[in-house]
Image (cartoon, rainbow, N blue to C red):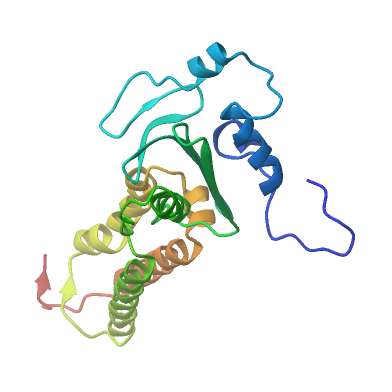
Amino acid sequence: MDVCEGSVSTYRWEPGRLPTASIVTSADDLGRFVLSQLGAGPQVVSPASRELLHTGVGKSEQFAYAMGWREGTTAGVPSLWHGGALPSYRGAVVMLPQSQSGVIVLTDVSSMFADHTREIAAGVVALLEERPVPSGIRPLRQTYLVIAVLSLLLVTFAVRGLVRAIANRGPKLKRSSVITFDIVLPLLGVFMAPRLAGVPLRAMWEGAPDLTLTIAILVVLSFATGAIKLSRRETPGAATVG
């Protein structure tokens, strides 16, 4: 990607993502593309071929997948739509064949917790077609507030456990219990997190660095707590809790 001299770009170029989630374009260029898909302007495919491109197969509850487009509804209006998402930006395109119009939403932010471009596009479609404006599926403010509170609580408890271990307070646990709760379970969490999220660790870091960093801090604190507990020598006759 060419960047003019003196400019600083915070976006990393990912050529490997081109086939799956990204198009190098501008709003004007993408607008011309949508008009061409709707049959306006110079054409490179016949009307029959264009219709074939837009015909969905393998229908699911919400849409049928056509050739690069999802055939379904947006705000209750028959539409063809698709989107793309990378860690730093996101886009959505909605075409309305019946009214020969389209909506394009491009943003320089992205989130793992909400498809905001799709929701914005649905709101614009509702206004254009005089339909009820759909409400947001997952409000980001509330989502991030819950995540922030939970993260703060988890880190607080982890720090408290480390302080207690350093001060040699609390019940002495069996070696197997310390290894299980302070080492094995955190490692299992790191192993399972990408599978539960459906993305690799690198994508988690790129898409939600704050949340991924919080998880890393919790793992480090747990390891440190476990190491301190394991290094303590049990005094003769001390009670153990398994």
Residue 72, image x, y percentages:
36, 32
Give the vertical position of 215 relative to 163 (above or below): above
Give the vertical position of 211 relative to 50 (above or below): below
Tell me where residue 236 sits by quadrant. Answer: bottom left
Residue 13, image x, y percentages:
70, 46
Q: Residue furthest right?
A: 5
In front of the other: 131 or 154? 131
Seen at 32% across and 58% down, the residue is 186
Q: Is residue 130 visible?
A: yes
Number of marks present in the image shown:
0
**Left or right side of 108 for 67:** left
**Left or right side of 144 for 87:** right
Tell me where residue 168 sits by quadrant. Answer: bottom left
Residue 230, image x, y percentages:
31, 68
In front of the other: 38 or 80? 38
In front of the other: 7 or 232? 7
Seen at 27% across and 75% down, the residue is 233
Seen at 60% across and 40% down, the residue is 22
Give the vertical position of 14 relative to 108 (above or below): above
Instruction: Give the quadrant of the N terminus.
Output: top right
Residue 158, image x, y percentages:
31, 75
**Left or right side of 200 for 227:** left
Tell me where residue 66 sits by quadrant. Answer: top left
